Amino acid sequence: MSAAPARAAVPVGRSVTVRVPATSANLGPGFDTLGLALSLYDELTVTALEGTGATVEVHGVGEGEVPTDASNLVVRSIAYTFAWAGVDLPGLHLVARNAIPHGRGLGSSGAAVASGIMAAKGLLAGLVELDADRLLALATDLEGHPDNVAPALFGGLTIAWTTPEGPQHKKLIAHRGVSPLVLVPEHTMSTALARSLQPTSVPHEDAIFNVSRSALLVAALVQSPELLLAATEDKLHQNYRAAAMPETSELVSLLRENGYAAVVSGAGPSILVLGSDPSQRLPAAELVARHASTPWEPLLLAVDFKGATVMPDPVRSTTSS
Ligand code: HSE
C-alpha cells in the first residue's frame, strides 16, 4: 500500500516582507464604503520556523504596548489565513516596523490585518493561491467592515460594498491634484465606542443627502477636485460622534468654514483635509495650529496607489546572486 501523501507545509526558513499603507475611511459621506490609501507605511517581516508558536518584535509605533504573543492581531490574521487554506501553521517570527499611529482613525488595525494576510499569502506561495476577492473577504472577516482594508490591500481610492457572496471592491485612481493633509492629535478614540454612538436608523432626507454627496465625492476625487468641499458633507456619522471628540468636531467645522474639505478620518479623532492642490495644505495646518488647544501633528501625505506590497526577501536575494 502506498503511503498517504504528505500534508503541504511551508518550507522552514521561508521569509516574506510586506509593506502596507495607512488609510482614511469614510471620507465624509462614504460611511463604511469609501477609503483612501495614504503614503505612511507599516512594514512586517515574517519567517517560518520549525515547531509551533509565534514570537513578535515590534519597533516604532506600538513598541512595548501591543501584544507579542498569539493574541497579536497580525499573528491572528496569519493564523486565520492558514486555517482558511487548510495548511498547518508553522512556527513564526515576526518583526514589525510600524509608522501608522494607533487609535487615531488612520487604519492601523486594518493595516495589521492586511499585513498578516499578505504575509500569509507570501508564505503560502506555491501551496495555496489567494486572489483579490479572497484577500478582501479574509480581511473583512477580521476587521468587521471593508472600508479600511480595501485601500490597505489595493491602494488608491476604493469603493467597497458587501454582497451575500462576500465583500467586493472597485479601485479608482485619484486625480493628481488631490492632496491629503492629516492632522493627528495626541489623544486616541476607540472605534468600538464611535460605532456604539451610531443610531440604528436615520432620517430618509439624511440618507438622500449622503447618497448625493458620496456620488459627487467619487467624481470630485477622480475628476473634479474643485468640488471637494461640497462633496465631503455628511449627515450619517460625524454629528453622532461629535460629543466623543469635541476638538476634532470644532476643528473640522473651522476648517470647512474657511473653505477646506475637512472630515473626520475614519472613526477619528484625526482630521483628513482633502486639498484640491498641494498649496492648500500648509495654510490649513497653520489654521489648526493657531486655534487648537492641544498639539496636532500635521502630515502632508500623498495618495498611495499600490496598496500592500510584498517586498523582495533581502536574505534570499543576496544568497542567490
Ligand atoms: N467606517 C468605520 C467607522 C471606519 O467609521 O466606524 C473605522 O474603522
Image (spheres, grey):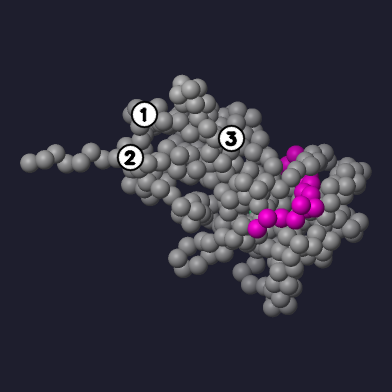
In the image, residue 118 sits, relative to residue 240, either above or below, namely: above
Which label's residue is closer to the chain start, 2 or 3?
3
In what quadrant of the picture does the N terminus appear? top left
Numbered mark located on residue 88 in the image? 2
Range shown magenta: 172-190
User: For disc 3, does the CB lie below 8 Å from ligand 1?
Assistant: no
User: For disc 1, does the CB lie below 8 Å from ligand 1?
Assistant: no
Q: Can residue 52 be seen from the camera position used here?
A: no
Question: Label 1: which residue?
Answer: 12
Q: What residue lies at 52% left-to-right and 32% top-to-bottom?
A: 312
Name the residue type under label 3.
Answer: Glu
Q: What residue lies at 91% left-to-right and 56% top-to-bottom?
A: 258
In the image, residue 143 sits, relative to residue 203, either above or below, namely: above
Question: Label 3: which residue?
Answer: 43
Q: Quadrant of residue 292?
A: top right
Q: What residue lies at 80% left-to-right and 59% top-to-bottom?
A: 225
In space, the residues marked 2 and 3 are separated at their CA atoms by 24 Å
